[in-house]
Each structure stands twice: as structure tokens, then as C-alpha cells.
Amino acid sequence: MSGVRVLVGTRKGAFLLTSDGTRRRWDVSGPLFAGWEVYHVKGSPADPNRLYASQTSGWFGQIIQRSDDGGRKWHQPGTPAGEPTTTPDGMPKGESNKFVYDTSSETGKALTTHQWYDGSQRPWEFKRVWHLEPSLTDPDTVYAGVEDAALFRSTDAGQTWRELAGLRGHGTGPRWQPGAGGMCLHTILLDPSDRARMYVAISAAGAFRSDDGGRAWKPINRGLRSQHIPEPTAEVGHCVHRIAMHRSRPNVLFMQKHWDVMRSDDAGESWREVSGNLPSDFGFVIDVHAHEPETIYVVPIKSDSEHFPPEGRLRVYRSRSGGSEWEPLTEGLPQSDCYVNVLRDAMAVDSLDPCGVYFGTTGGQVYATANAGQSWAPIVRDLPAVLSVEVQTLR
Amino acid sequence: MIRVVLPAHLRTLARVDREVSLEIEGEVTLRAVLDALEARHPALRGTIRQHVTLERRPFLRFFACEEDLSLQSPDAPLPQAVATGAEPLMIVGAIAGG
């Protein structure tokens, strides 16, 4: 019997929503880490019982949590509950919340400053983990995208973290700048056909690709056009909100940029706009149908200054042609007086047939469809503002 | 025995009750107390002081004996009443956010 587990991060804790394969009835558990912002929770594709969570606070900083039993019990990886806190030789165990930028002469180079809002240069300063991306094959390997933008990797199940400094060090770092939400690395895509290839996206710098496992990086922003920056077609500086791929075609990428929905058919070497007939091409989320690589979903938001759906009508838009031609999906979604937002990490799909699509709102609703978008219903309505939604299909 | 009062979220993280009791050898300073606290409860590393720099996190303050000790040197002796355990060292989260 198959099942689905939806992992929800919110402003005040995490929630786990579970159902069987029919996706009709849902159990809601939580809050986990109550009172803390949980930016992201994600399960390992290689071991669905292995979950990682980013728990963060303006007061107390960053915490990484891990579960090895599908979310029933959690602990900070360096200090498992009930175990000795030091190794037999007296050394403290791993410090799972320690994210220190690499400043070594071999790899760190002079990774000292990025651009601030006023154009001045400012040192990198770690603030939080936005996104956790477990390896496709190894449950103990997990990547973390952080603010100020950088990429870290743990190969010991979250106990210790090391920066992949080639991303900040490839040369464009001093031209990166924060967007309204901070300078964050929020998207990490691992190529299922090529272990050495990965993509990241940063607000506001753009998209980047590595072909050697994260050591060397290059910007992949040709074709992006951002009117709000001094040089609209610059190599970096674009506020990319989200990138998605279908695992069967990892060279095809879909992007929701600050404004514009974009598509690349050559692993990010070039992009073309596919906003088509969307009522607004501003938005945050984008995702791909689990079984139809040309079917994609976005949630249009009115503008960068009005973060709610156009006309107060919450609509998911679906394209079955890889963009340009879009249809509104409205059944079960509020079509009047709706002024929520859907943040960049708050949409996901399951791999059942028909495909399920899930998204969370800043109003605390998590909506789901079990028929690829034809009709929607809320799983829960009154959570804290939703920051992230991930889905595990359990078989 | 030194008594330390933690804010609610840190008590949850460390899985302790309201007060933590610590044995300190030598002079009782803020640094010595925080070192001992983090050694006992590694889950608290990085949550009170920044990693590497060991600077106090900006939204936390230290109080004891009705005094704000946040800006004093971490190597200055804490009040005698804290050193004897008569009064606790309180780690307080700023009330902010509306």
C-alpha cells in the first residue's frame, strides 16, 4: 500500500501530514520545534525514514535536526539525545549547527565581500539555512543552501558541514546582492543522470551550475532579462526565485524568476521566456508533473510590491506544453478575497498516478490535488505561515 | 554550584528544566560559565554565543543580581552571589517582534 508524507515548514514549527495512496484523509502531526522558524524539511530519496530539518531563530541562530525514523523522533545530529556528548577521547561530538565560511588559501580565496543594497561591499555573514537537499543516493550526504548565499555539504548525516567554496570563489561573488528576503541560496537541484552535475539558484545573483561535484561553478543566466538591475542582461544579479527539473530530462530546466517564467533546454546555457498568457509572470514557486515532463505548475502573484494573487483569486496555472500556453486551475481554490502568498519552497509533487501536487500559503493553508490539478482541497487550513512544502511518496 | 536560567527555547533544545546547575573550577566568569554550560549541553553551542567568534548573539542578554552583565568583559568575575549559587545567572532573550 502506498502512502504520502507531506513535510511542512512554517514560521512557528514543522508539521507532518500523512495519508494513504488515495490522498483523501490526512493525519496532521506537529508542531515540531514549536515556536521556531522551520525553513525546510526534506527526506532522503535513498532512505525515506531519514529526514533533515532546518530550524532557525533570530535569537538563537541555526539548528539542524535529523530524524532516522520518518519523523517520530528528532535530534541534533552532533548530539543525539541520551548519548554521551563527547567522544571517548573527550572531544565534543559534531557541531551540527556550525556553518563557517571557508577562508582557506587553497579553496576559500578572498571570499570576503558581496554587494549591499546601496552598492557598497559587505562581508559575508551566516544567518540561516534556507534549503536542505539530501543526496539522491547516500542518506548521510546532504547539501545546505544558506543565507548569506553559499553552499555547504555534510557527508556525516548532518553532524559537520563544509562549504563548497568554489561557488563563492569563482569570481562573481562581489556582484551578488540581497533580494528583499536576504541574499539566500534557496534552490539545489541534483542531476539524477550525472552525479557530478548540480544546479543552484541565489537571490539575487542568478543560477549556477557545477559539472564536477560542486568544486567549480559557472553562472548560467544567458537569456535572463531583469529590468530592475542596472544592466538587465548582466551575467549575474538576477533574482531567480525557483528552478525545477523533471528527473527524466535533467537538461531541461524551468525557472520562476522575480518577473518572468523561463525555460532552458540546454542545462542552463541559455534561457527563453515562456510566460505566455499568465495573468502575472511574477511568482515564487514552479514545479514539474511527476510523469509528464512538459507539464509544469506556477502560482502567479500580482507583483513584487503586492505579494498576493491577482484579483484576490488563488489560481494554480498549468502548462502542458512546457510553457507559453497556460490554463488556470481553480476548482477548490478560493476565488475571491484571497490575499495569501506562496513562497518559493512551498510547492511539491508526489509520484503517484495521477500525480499529486501540493502547495502551502502564508495564510497557513496547505492545498493538495490528487488529480494533477483538476480539483484542489485544503489538507489543513490554519497552520502558521507556510515556508516550505516537500512530499515523500512512500511505497 | 552555579545556577543558570535559560530561556524556554534553549531549555527545550538542551532538554533541561528551568535551571541548570554547573560546577566551575577556578574563577567564576561569564566565559567559564558558558564554556561549562556548552560542554554539558553541546546542543547549545552557537545558540548563545556565535561559533568561532564566541560573541554574544545580539538578541540575548545576561543578567544577575538585578544587573545587566551583557556588556562586561567575559573574563570579569561574576557577582559573588552567583559564584556561591545564591543567585542565578539569567540568559534572557530580547522581547522583540511585536
Image (tube, coloured by chain):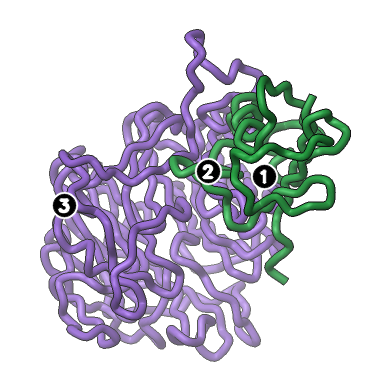
Chain colours: A purple, B green
> Disc 3 designates what residue?
A217
Which residue is labeled 2 in the image?
Answer: A53
Q: Disc 1 designates what residue?
A: A32
- Asked if residue A280 is positioned above or below residue A13 in the image, the reply reads below
Q: Quadrant of the N terminus of chain A?
A: top right
Instruction: Rate crowding at label 2 as few (under 14), some (14 to 19) or many (20 or more) other CA atoms within 10 Å.
Output: many
**Could you tell me residue A289's position as x and y percent?**
37, 58
In space, the residues marked 1 and 3 are separated at their CA atoms by 36 Å
Please determine whether, in this image, residue A32 is positioned above or below residue A8: above
Q: Give SS at disc 3.
A: loop
State the residue at coordinates (42%, 76%).
Answer: A283
Tell whether label 2 touches label 1 (CB within 8 Å).
Answer: yes
Quick one: label 2 or label 3, which is nearer the N terminus?
Answer: 2
What residue lies at 35% left-to-right and 30% top-to-bottom? A155
Where residue A51 sits in the image (x, y, percent)?
51, 37
Q: CA distance from mark 1 to mark 2?
A: 10 Å
Task: Write down the quadrant of residue A197 in the picture.
Answer: top left
* Within-10-Å neighbours for mark 3: few <14, some 14–19, many 20+: many
- Give the residue type that dot 1 points to: Leu
User: What's the distance in space between the residues labelled 2 and 3, CA to CA?
Assistant: 26 Å
